[in-house]
Amino acid sequence: MGLRNLQTFLFFLLLMVLGLSAPLSAAEGKRLALVVGNSAYTATTPLANAAADARAFTAFLKENGFEVDSLINVDRAGFARGLPNFSKKIGPADTALFYFAGHGMQLKGENFLLGLDAELLSEFDVDAEAIALNSIISIMERKASLSLLFVDACRNNPIADRLNASVEGVTRGAALKGLAPVSSTGSGTMIAFSASPGQVAYDGVGENSPFTTALVEHLASPSLEVGTAFKRVIRDVRIKTNNVQSPQIVSNIAAEFYFNASAPATAVAASDFLAQIDFEKAERIATARGWQLYLAKHQSGSFSDSARAALRLLEGGGDGLVSPQKAESRMRLTQSQRKEIQLTLSDLGYDIGAVDGNFGQKTRRAISRYQKALGLTETGYI
């Protein structure tokens, strides 16, 4: 591939991987949150990380200006008492947030969150022993200006199997693992799930689940609006679970929201805009000196990694042509970057095989087909 074509390919592909920031919309009113984390279940499998996830997310929220009601290891009654206590604090100009880590399940298309004491011996016990997610959504949409819900309740739950066995007739099989699809009805609502409908989420092998780990990392960034940040959460979780768990977001938020309220996000957005202009200039010049000047001015930011990759292609090789293999080798892509490229190609509909960071035959064919779609020389190398 010629150098110019190669840089164009990198520009398109890496920008999709890295993403761009968006301008800030000023928040009004209070920031209020209810965080629930249940680990010590008595009638079903205990969860190692749910309570720790809730504590980690509580700390993150407090650092970013939220007043938090935190409920750790509560039964259904304690869960139910926490909802009106939270609801009565919410005013019409406020941002309200709900986070749940623990067991959840779907029954006949409706989602339920479980307290520690849930047994659910039959379908008739569900209303008395579980909390309907839709009821929480309705409360928040009715009272808050902006409603944000983060639900990590898709973990493997044996109660669903037991309940399924008790459901009779045509409804047998109505109790399923994972959660059902949700569509919000009010404006200004975003609902984020740790897994897609019907998928089971992993509790994780570390201190926190893959979902909560990614949330805390990316939502804290001052340069990322919540919708953009969640795209990075999706990528991280897919990578950590080898593409078997994919978080989902349902949103009808018109305004933009940033968690990191203390950071000058408008300045960050303006800086990114100027960096994009300079990046495009350097990309048109396509010389090592051009990229060096860019990086001297923009040492960090949304485009710096792409600029360094382009510079590495030129260093030691002049401004002439280099072989595709050598050009890719000079980029020194990390394993994580390779996985992100594979995920990006997969999202575009290309078959890349396993998301493992190794560019095997399927990944090479996917790169070639993507190059062809862009009108570039097909080499199979980045």
Image: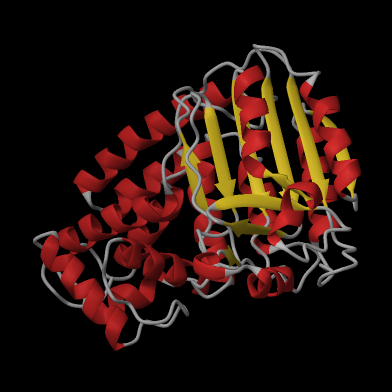
Vertical comparison of 114 with 203: above or below: above
Residue 126 in sight:
yes
Which quarter of the rendered picture does the C terminus lie within? bottom left
Q: Which colour scheme is used?
A: secondary structure
Instruction: Report whether 69 appears left or right of 232.
Output: right
- The residue lying furthest to the front in this view is 169
Residue at image position (53%, 64%) is 171
- Tag count: 0
Image quadrant where one finds the N terminus: bottom left
In which quarter of the view is residue 20 placed? top left
Residue 312 left/right relative to 267:
left
Q: State which quadrant residue 329 falls in.
A: bottom left
Q: Where is residue 163? Give x, y as percent.
A: 69, 68
Judging depth in this view, the residue of 363 and 136 nearest the camera is 136
**Front residue (pair 109, 365):** 109
Which residue is rendered at x = 45% and y = 31% of the image?
252
- Residue farthest to the bottom? 361
Q: Is residue 223 above or below residue 154?
A: above
Please tell me which residue is depicted at 53% across the width and 46% down the height of the picture. Answer: 230
The residue nearer to you, when weighing 269 against 47, is 47
Q: In the rendered image of this protein, does residue 7 appear above or below residue 320?
A: above
* Residue at 22% from the left image edge and 80% from the top image edge: 365
Between 244 and 14, the one nearer to me in the picture: 244
Residue 135 is situated, as x and y percent measured from the top left of the image, at 66, 35
Residue 61, image x, y percentages: 76, 36
Q: In this view, does 148 lie above or below 361?
A: above
**Residue 263 in view in this figure:** no
Q: Residue 116: x percent and y percent?
A: 87, 57
